[in-house]
Image (spheres, grey):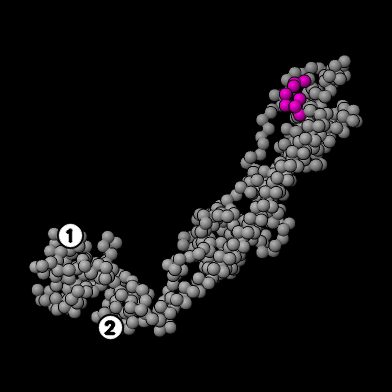
């Protein structure tokens, strides 16, 4: 009872006629007494109080609505109790009620010092806060406008790069078309006949020997390929993207395309038993018989057909020799020329496929990422040197943090990095914030081996609204 009487005494100082402490002007009308001097909780009208129970430092309403100007009612997520600061000279704001009268001037939210109304120890600094705020807004506006003009330059560069890439695609397609036309002209080893899959009699022993030779060569080439792959992998992981070496970058691109296409390699689904459909003793003699003229072109087709099938399993290698055959010089020459043409078509097609895949990558709005593809940013922060290779990979010194998986307009994602000791594979998110130049602002490791980078960049600059520009404003109390 005594406590109640004491608190009522205090309430007299915080309930000013017509103005309830902690309530914004537009909500004051909710705090009008009824004719009989009563008032009810805002969210539970069944709880009726005396008007002077408002702000009496005693929590009567479960929703806390009777104590807008004190911290008597607990601040919960269900009922966050917020105190209104008028901040005369700047902008009104709200502060959590548990920060009221705690001896700290919370100028970030209440520059008028009204959060410490009991002691009155916090003078109004709103004019100075406004000065800092205006400076912050104009600096950020200036930076974002400069950033935006760099972004526009990026977009122009991206459009130009896209046009060049389109031209290259058209050029490659044209070259392939011409090669096809040329190939269709040289009918010596007619591909249409090959596609008909005519079966003929062959010397099984010789074909077998040839197959064994191919197998041996294939195994040798596979070993050589593994060692080349390993050399390229090492180069891709360790190269320095800041040395603008076009040859290295091209080699790395080609390697990455090659790796991403590896799974799509053509499988030869023909077994030897499927190839040999008929076995005749002395078949060599049979080939020299009267029907030789009829058989010869088809034999040649067959050799080409199965030879090509085998060669498809190998990396392109001009040194692989055409299998010997019992053909005339002219026929052999035509066959070799034809074979070279087929190989050229294949390698051009591989080039075109890789270029198309690169072209179809997600380059973000207005293809902007084309402008920074192949570039990067590097900076030492704390104990490590961090290297972000855009659309490629992130490194912490020589440790691979992750490989590029995509861009969502605000951040780039990298996964599948080197495995953490007793932990997951490393991964990273690079969050972009608007600025005229690239700069690595911070690196966090919120969870072991999962990194978050904040990178200043023109990529995400926009014409920001004032509230967006104000987002990271903080009051510098040292200047008061
Ligand atoms: C290295 C760094 C750290 C990481 C630890 C995990 O020291 O990559 O960022 O947290 O490994 O063992």
Residue 193, percent from left and from top: 76, 25
Residue at the spot 14% in from the left edge and 76% down from the top edge? 8
Q: Secondary structure at mark 2?
A: loop
| Label placed on residue 44 | 1
Q: State the image quarter where residue 183 is shown.
A: top right
Q: Secondary structure at mark 1?
A: loop
Residue at the spot 21% in from the left edge and 66% down from the top edge? 30
The residue carrying pointer 2 sits among few (fewer than 14), some (14 to 19) or many (20 or more) residues within 10 Å by Cα, namely: some
Q: Is residue 405 visible?
A: yes
Let me know if residue 90 is in the magenta part: no
Q: State the image quarter where residue 90 is shown.
A: bottom left
137 relative position to 40: left or right: right
Q: Are marks 1 and 2 in contact (CB under 8 Å)?
A: no
Placement of the C terminus among the 4 image quadrants: bottom left
The residue carrying pointer 1 sits among few (fewer than 14), some (14 to 19) or many (20 or more) residues within 10 Å by Cα, namely: few
Residues shaded magenta: 191-200
| Of the pair 199 and 401, the residue shown nearer to us | 199
Q: Which residue is labeled 2 in the image?
A: 120
438 relative position to 471: left or right: right
Residue at the spot 67% in from the left edge and 62% down from the top edge? 240
């Amino acid at each position: 009872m005594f406590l109640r009487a004491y608190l009522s005494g205090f309430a007299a100082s915080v309930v000013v006629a017509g103005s309830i402490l902690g309530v914004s002007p537009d909500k004051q009308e909710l705090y009008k007494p009824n004719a009989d001097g009563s008032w009810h909780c805002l969210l539970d009208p069944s709880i009726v109080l005396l008007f002077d129970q408002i702000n009496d430092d005693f929590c009567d309403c479960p929703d806390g609505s009777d104590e807008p100007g004190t911290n008597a009612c607990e601040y919960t997520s269900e009922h966050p109790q917020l105190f209104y600061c008028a901040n005369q000279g700047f902008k009104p704001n709200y502060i959590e009620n548990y920060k009221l009268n705690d001896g700290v001037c919370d100028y970030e939210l209440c520059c008028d010092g009204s959060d410490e109304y009991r002691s009155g120890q916090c003078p109004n600094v709103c004019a100075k806060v406004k000065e800092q705020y205006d400076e912050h807004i104009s600096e950020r506006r200036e930076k974002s406008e400069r950033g935006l003009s760099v972004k526009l330059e990026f977009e122009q560069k991206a459009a130009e790069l896209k046009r060049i890439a389109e031209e290259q695609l058209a050029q490659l397609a044209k070259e392939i078309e011409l090669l096809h036309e040329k190939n269709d002209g040289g009918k010596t080893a007619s591909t249409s006949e090959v596609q008909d899959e005519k079966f003929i009699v062959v010397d099984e022993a010789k074909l077998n020997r040839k197959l064994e030779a191919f197998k041996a060569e294939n195994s040798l080439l596979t070993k050589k390929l593994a060692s080349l792959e390993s050399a390229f992998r090492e180069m891709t992981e360790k190269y320095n993207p800041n040395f603008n070496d076009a040859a290295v970058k091209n080699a790395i691109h080609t390697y990455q395309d090659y790796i991403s296409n590896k799974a799509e390699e053509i499988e030869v689904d023909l077994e030897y038993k499927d190839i040999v459909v008929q076995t005749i003793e002395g078949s060599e003699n049979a080939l020299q018989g009267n029907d030789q003229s009829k058989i010869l072109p088809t034999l040649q087709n067959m050799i080409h057909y199965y030879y090509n099938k085998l060669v498809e399993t190998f990396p392109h290698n001009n040194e692989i020799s055409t299998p010997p055959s019992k053909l005339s010089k002219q026929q052999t020459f035509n066959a070799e020329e034809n074979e070279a043409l087929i190989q050229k078509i294949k390698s051009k097609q591989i080039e075109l496929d890789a270029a198309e895949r690169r072209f179809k990558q997600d380059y973000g709005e207005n293809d902007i990422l084309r402008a920074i593809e192949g570039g990067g940013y590097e900076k030492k922060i704390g104990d490590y040197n961090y290297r972000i290779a855009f659309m490629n990979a992130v490194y912490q010194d020589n440790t691979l943090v992750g490989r590029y998986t995509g861009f969502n307009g605000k951040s780039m994602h990298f996964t599948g990095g080197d495995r953490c000791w007793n932990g997951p594979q490393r991964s990273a998110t690079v969050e972009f914030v608007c600025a005229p130049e690239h700069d690595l602002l911070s690196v966090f490791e919120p969870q072991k081996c999962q990194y978050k980078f904040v990178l200043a960049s023109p990529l995400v600059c926009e014409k920001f609204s004032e509230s967006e520009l104000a987002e990271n404003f903080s009051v510098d109390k040292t200047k008061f």
